[in-house]
Amino acid sequence: MEYGNLLVENRDGIVIVTINRPKALNALNRDTLNDLKAFFGQDALKIQGLKGVVLTGSGEKSFVAGADISEFNGLDAQGGLEMSQNGHDIFFLIERFHKPVIAAVNGFALGGGCELAMSCHMRIAGEKARFGQPEVNLGIIPGYGGTQRLIQYIGKSKAIELLLTADMIGAEEAYRLGLVNHVVPAGEEVNKAIEILTKIAAKAPIAIEKIIECVNAYFPTEGFNREVIEFANTVKTEDFKEGAAAFLEKRVADFRGK
Ligand code: COA
C-alpha cells in the first residue's frame, strides 16, 4: 500500500492512517481523498487480522483543516455536485467500515476535517484540538456530511449555532457537547485510540460488525442528498468566489448575497 498523502502503519492489526500534508495543515485535496477511498474501499479489506483503524493528522497543529481551498478555483455547480457526492461516498465508506475507526484529533478539525472525524465511529481529542464548520466564511455550506452528522452528535440547537456562526470550539467544549468521546493530553490521542481498539478486538468480530450496521441504520440519509444539492447551489454564487479568494489573499470576505 503506497499513497501520496497517507502514511499507513500496521501495529499488530491496528492500522494507524496519518494524513500527511502538514504544510497545508493536512487539507483534503483530491489526491488525499483518492487515497482515503483506495484505503477504506479496497486496501484495508485485504489486511489480514485487521482489528481497527486510527485516523490522525501529521504534525502537532492540525488533524485536517478542511477541504483544500486552493483547489476551489474554477469550481462550478456541476463540479461542486461531484465533489460533494464523492466526499459523501468516501465518508460513508468510513462510517460503514466493518471494523471500528477512531479519529485521533491532534489539532484543527475544521470543515471537511470535522466532517471526516465525524464519519469515524469515535473521536479522541487532544487538549489542543479545535473543531468547527467554517464554510459560511467561504460562502458555502459543509459538503461532506457536516450539516447532518453534527446534529447526530450534538443535537440541532448547538449544531445550527456552530454551522451558522462558524465558531470554533475546543476539546473540552466538544467533549461537553458529546462530539468527542475522550479528551487526552496532547500527543496521547493515538495511544488512547489504540487502547479502545484493543479492548474491542477481544470481542466477537461479527457482533462488532453488526453493531456498526445497526447504529448506522438508526439515521436517515435524505438530508445528506439535500446537502449535496445545496452545496452545489452555494458553489455557483459570487459569494463563494469572493470567500475562497479572500481566504487565499488572507483578507476578510465582502459578501453581497449574490
Ligand atoms: N486549504 C488549503 N490550504 C490551507 C487550508 C485549507 N483548508 N487550511 C490551511 N491552509 C494552508 C494555509 O493557506 C497556509 O498556507 P501558506 O503557509 O502557504 O500560506 C498554511 O496552511 C498554514 O495555515 P495558516 O492559515 O497560515 O495557519 P493559521 O495558524 O494562521 O490558521 C487555521 C489556521 C486552520 C485557522 C486557518 O488555516 C484556516 O482557517 N484554514 C481554513 C479552514 C477552513 O475554512 N476550512 C474549511 C474549508 S471548506
Image (cartoon, helix red, strand yellow):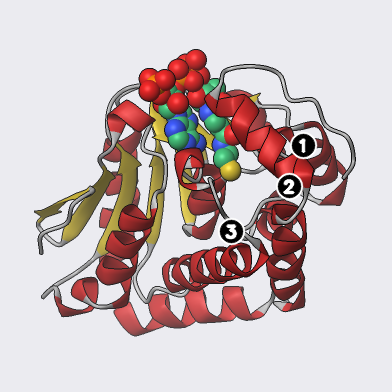
**Which label sits on residue 162?**
1
Q: Is residue 201 above or below residue 177?
A: below
Counting residues from the start of the chain, the first of labels 2 and 1 encountered is 2
Q: Residue 60 location, x and y as percent?
A: 32, 22
Q: Secondary structure at mark 1?
A: helix
Label 3–label 2 contact, CB within 8 A: no
Amino acid at circle 1: Leu
Q: Is residue 161 above or below residue 95?
A: above
User: Within 10 angstroms of label 2, few (less than 14), some, or many (20 or more) residues?
Assistant: some
Q: Residue 218 location, x and y as percent?
A: 68, 77
Q: Residue 188 location, x and y as percent?
A: 31, 28
Q: Secondary structure at mark 2?
A: helix
Q: Nearer the viewer, residue 100 or 2?
A: 2
Give the residue at mark 3: 144
Task: Identify the image quadrant of residue 100.
Answer: bottom left
Q: CA distance from mark 3 to mark 2?
A: 17 Å
Give the residue at mark 2: 154
Q: Residue at x 25, y 45 (%)?
A: 18
Q: Nearer the viewer, residue 11 or 145?
A: 145
Question: Could one spot residue 171 in this view of the protein?
Answer: no
Assess mark 2: CB under 8 A from ligand 1? Answer: no
Counting residues from the start of the chain, the first of labels 3 and 2 encountered is 3
Q: Nearer the viewer, mark 3 or mark 1?
A: 3
Amino acid at circle 3: Tyr
